[in-house]
Amino acid sequence: MITIKRLKIVAITMILGFFASVVGVKAQDTAEGEQIFKNNCSTCHAVTDEVVVGPGLKGISQRRPIDWIVKWVHNPQAVIASGDKYAVDLYNKYNKAQMTAYPGYSEAQIKSVIAYIDAQAVAPVAVAGAAPVAGAAAPAEGASNGGMMQYILIALLGVMVLVLIALLSIVSSLTKLASVSPESAEAQKIPLLQRIAENGKKLASNSAFKTGAALLITLLIGKATLDSAYGIGMHQGYAPEQPIQFSHKLHAGQYEINCNYCHTGVYKGKGANIPSANICMNCHNAIKRESPEIQKIYRSLEKDEPIQWVRVHNLPDLAYFNHAQHTNVGGLECTNCHGEIAKMEVVQQRSSLTMGWCIDCHRKTEVNAKGNAYYDKLVELHNTEHKGNMKVQDIGGLECSKCHY
Amino acid sequence: MENNTKRYWRGIEELTNSSEFVKHAHREFGDAPIADEKGELIIDGTNTVRRDFLKVLGFGVSAVALAACEAPIKKAIPYLNKPEDVEPTIANWYASTFVDGGEYASVLVKTREGRPIKVEGNKASSVSKGALSARVQASVLSLYDNEKLKGATIGGKAADWNVADKEIIAGLGSIAARGGQIRIVSNTILSPTTKKVIGDFIAKYPTAKLVTYDANSVSGLVHANGGVLPSFDFSKAKTIVSIGADFLGSWISPAEFAGQWAKTRRVNSAEGGNKEMSRHYQFETIMSNTGANADYRSTYKPSQEGLVVAALYNAIASKTGGATISSASVKIDHLDKAAADLVATKGASLVVSGSNDPAVQTVVVAINAMLGAYGATIDAGTPVNYRQGSDAEMTQFINEAKAGQIGAVIFYNANPVYNHPRGAELGEALAKIGLTISTNDRADETGSLCKYNTPDSHYLESWNDAEPKRGHYSFSQPTISTIFKTRQAQSSLLKWSGLDADYATYLENAWTSSLGGKVAWSKVLHDGIYEPGAGAAFNVPQTGLADAVSSISKNYKANSDKMELAIYEKVTMGTGSQANNPFLQECPEPVSKACWGNYATVSLATAKALGVDQEIELDTHEVEVSVNGKSVKLPLLVQPGQANNTVAIAIGYGRTKAGKSANGVGVNAYPLASVINGNIAFSNTGDVQVKATGETAQVARTQTHNTVMARESVVQETVLSAYKKNVEAGRFRPSISTAEGKVEINAENGNKQEISKEGVSLWNGHKYNNHAWGMVIDLNTCTGCAACVVSCNAENNIAVVGRKEVINRREMHWMRIDRYYSSDADVEDAKGLEQASENPEVVFQPMLCQHCNNAPCETVCPVLATTHSTEGLNQMTYNRCIGTRYCANNCPYKVRRFNWFRYYQTDEYDFQFNNDLGRMVINPDVTVRSRGVMEKCSMCVQRIQAGKLEAKKEKRRPIDGEIQVACAQSCPTDAITFGDMNDSNTAISKLLANEKKGRAFGVIEEINVKPSISYLVKIRNKEEKVVKEEAHAEPHHS
């Protein structure tokens, strides 16, 4: 609670039970609103009643008239300066901190954001649209890796059955021998332990048994070697400790901050980019300043020493991967490769990042060609020549120099 | 290699087929490692015995396997405060200006995460028009030169800038107070604001004076044109005559001139397309790059130069009815013909001379005036500022310095101790000067003799402006903050003048006031240029002709059987200011194809007369060239086409204090220059002796590294008159005899398995649904300037391997320019064809991976490391390659390169990839290849992929020209056209549509590999030879 009191950012509206004129936002494009909200507002505002940095926005369209909201979003400072009582109260309530002005958004866009907020109030759940995608990817991958393992296991099982048969036949022939031998009665007299030891010795000198055992050991070692060889350079599940205990679960999960907000390159460039400290400071110059983890950011800023994060996802230099191609053009969700980041306290490498994994996806994934004029001719040609939709592999997605140059 | 009418050869040794040549010819990569005294094989370059190497290798493999279990921790370090306009992994481009003395180019600088990695031409400039020379392309690497000074020094020791400033200000003050002379010695200064700064300095210290000189001086030309250097426009010329001016290679502004020249050489085979070309005559001593591109070429000796010009004057005068001048007559081939053509195209004729003798240039001015060139092909009203040096001023300065009359000297980015013929004298005289300051970027030959070194920043770290041409301005902005503790020389001068202004502010103030505001200033910085243009009327100076004529008769001789020296500037190395740039050192000179050093070139006849004709391929003779008592020892190189009884040496080498890539490479030829009429002449007609020392020496040459394996149709050429009659003249159409008669191999749609009338092929061919990338290279406009070679090196992280490895035939260049000589003997004259011509014709052919559709390399790779893409590219996958080299063996074009060693982080290859600073130039989008893998031209696949992505992001098809490969982008003559052959609207498709039934051919078409790169037949604007019946020689197929 103390932290909330210390918050210095002013919200848009805050009087409960104020019924303003009904605003016509029904027909707004909630999808656009969602995009704008996630990129800009979600850092400080929740769609619920919850106070994040600024007030929760649930029911905002009832609380304030739309004209006021637009004016406020475009220039909060001017609204406060005009002496608007509501605005001044709000300003004071949130420790006289300013909301960032967004003069660039049109009225229609602001309405779409409100429409999105209202829609969320009606249907508060239905978030994890990406979950099935991630789920689909995971078993697919298990299958590709498991296929090889299954064959090995079946082969091993077969070998073991063979060894068992061999052993049984040895035992049975030995018993036969024992039973026909004249000394069998004498043998009965020999103490059990001694008999077992002698039988053991006989068994050890039996060449068929020796061969069988050697084969088994070789196979086991072979399997272990193969397993570890496949694992070389593969770091699935790698979750190193980071210099600052940053929680994606909190930021991406609870506060639903869009990935793009911090990873600024993800739709634009090759790298998604680890955020620079000034992006952290957008919020953390106000929030949770006294947290020892956030103090680390302050220290590094003071000392002018960048934060040395530990890389989680390491691709070899010889492979070229471009985020924009996959997120922007391909329309893939981040979770597709990175797993459910929003649930990770510590980020973990969820996918194997092997070439087999890449190729597998390129074989199965359809090209996101809809509405992209680049692919028009290709789709047309594909449809005349093949049945089924155009996969990445159909347009050269498996070629070497798509990734290696 | 034979053609229908000509025999081509790449070097004397190939033509004579010497035993040494044959021995090496088929060894693509040089010899196997040599054995040491114990008979153990040495792994070359590492001094490791093979067995030890294998032991270590064995250990290494197991160690790696063990180590791999543990993941190395890699750090991801973001910006602390990300600059707003920098987005990691996305390149930023800035307009700037390259200036090195009088060399100029408006450039665009590509930066990644704040470090410049590539320089490209700025097409917005009407002066340089986006053309960059090899040196400008290479200049980005000079930025990361670790051997530059890292801060101010006093007496060779690192010093604080404030201390240095204080001492210098005190020193200058006391010298000025007692009236001592102060000199600022500089090369040409293109920047008007820098001149203003110097003006402020002189205002503070009135005894100061600016002395300007140029290492490659044209002060004779400036003098003859009344003090200005006129703008030449070769694009308007129908007849071009050059007397010793290598205007396509090294004279004044070659990249710019090459672009203009190429405009007059571009023909179009389509119906109604342009079939006219300029005619280019070249008279010269050495075989220059320009001479190699000329239609008619003949030679003279340096002692005849003035008389050649006078003879041309007389020939023109007698044809136009003007008064002739009296001079001894010389017999030069084609001179009369040249005069006739010049007169015939009066008003569109241009004569240029490379002489630095004002008398000779005065006659040239008179010739151009007679031909009406002023106002047409010569614009003296908007002169250029590329060379402002005055040889007389510099001579006077050296004399004063020797006499102890100078109190203080500031060398502003000038290195006269190295690059002035009297440098040694100046070096000694510097001890007599009380205060010596150098702003050179390193403690070079001059700087190391100065007490104070206050290093200037690199141009990519600097603010500046330039006025290359009157009324045409160009701006530099820093694209990186200073790497070392350097300070712009202008800021230093301002500081010493007592004006405590920073040059950046000074410049901004100057321009905001003249442009009228900060917005305008930002705009010109963004564009890189500002061209209000201001031509002025100009009167052709026609005085002093009589004096010039008498001077010529005195200084030149019609006949001389003495040995003479010619000094020339190499196209790649220039004056040697960037000698410590490994890209430039390893870039082969277009004609000799030699790199890493200079050499004495002589004609074959002269070599024979000296008893040193070159019969050995790898080793050559060492000769001692002595000129008026000064002598240098260097390797001999037989250069066909050079004037007999002359020896030629290039400047730019023999640096002693430039850095590890330059020191001790070659010899310094500047001291051998002579003086004519007070101007430096790059020749010497005094006592020149050439003697074999008896030692052998080596020249690192690339051309003779592979043979053409007696294949036909590598280069194809014709003459203009034949082309006008038949656009397919000179084309070689291979055919094959079958049971059904002769079938053309390579007809359209030839990818059929059966023999059909369309063609013959074993292959199924490929289908390209999306793109089909290809290239067309016009041999008619390619001048061989090598800008593409350096551009490719910078773009694709190509390793520099050094002199020794080039000699071992292991250079890594993906793009090379093959140079072929052709014999002028008659086809039927079998004997004559065996002789190396005195004056061969030259063809340049850029050669790179041809991205064959039926690629021979792809079929032999055992691990499928080289495969074909659905976009027509021949892909090379380094991480899959195991280095069998089968692909290289099977490549008919010999364009594949093998990484014999790890060329990065290895002390044996101590070039840019061996230190952290040098590695800043690496293009992060291209893998740095390791030892043991093959590599070759990828057709800049990283650019193709990036361009496609950009288009996909914007949901459209790529626009033609948006994706440019490095070589095509950098070609000053636009000889290379790159694009998508699947899209009928692209430039390449249109060009091919015109030329398919005209000049377009594939190299070695008869082997039917179907290259994606087409070449256009070279055409010379010559009279057709009296051809004895178009003997269509049968192609041989076994």
Image: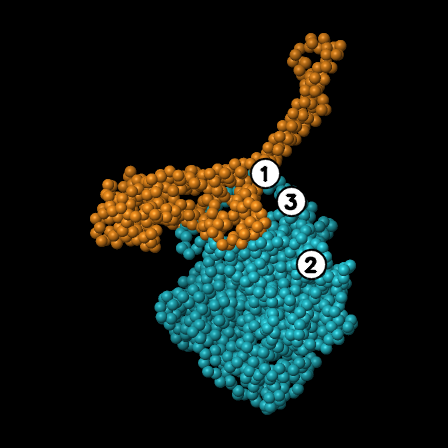
Colour representing chain B: cyan
Q: Which residue bears the numbered disc 2?
A: B1008
Amino acid carrying mark 3 in the image: Leu
Q: Position of residue B301 (x, y in %)?
A: 66, 79
Q: Residue at x 72, y 55 (%)?
A: B754
Mark linked to residue A209: none
Marks 3 and 2: which is nearer the front?
2
Amino acid carrying mark 2 in the image: Asn
Q: Are marks 3 and 2 in contact (CB under 8 Å)?
A: no
Mark linked to residue B57: 3
Name the residue nearer the viewer: A212 or B580.
A212
Q: Which residue bears the numbered disc 1?
A: A230
User: What kind of colouring is applied to the model shown?
Assistant: by chain
Q: From the rendered image, report the letter of the chain displayed in orange.
A: A
Name the residue nearer the viewer: B195 or B771.
B771
| Number of disc labels | 3
Vertical arrangement, residue B553 with respect to residue A44, above or below: below
Q: Position of residue A214 (x, y in %)?
A: 67, 28
Task: Say which element carries label 3.
Answer: helix
Chain containing mark 2: B
Instruction: Specify whether residue B181 is in view.
Output: no
Chain containing mark 1: A
Give the distance between the C-alpha atoms of the residues marked 1 and 2, in whole angstroms.
Answer: 43 Å
Name the residue nearer the viewer: B243 or B907.
B243
| Left or right placement of residue B975 versus residue B95 in this view | right
Q: Residue at x 25, y 47 (%)?
A: A21
Instruction: Specify whether residue B72 is in view.
Output: yes
The quadrant of the rendering that contains the N terminus of chain B is bottom right
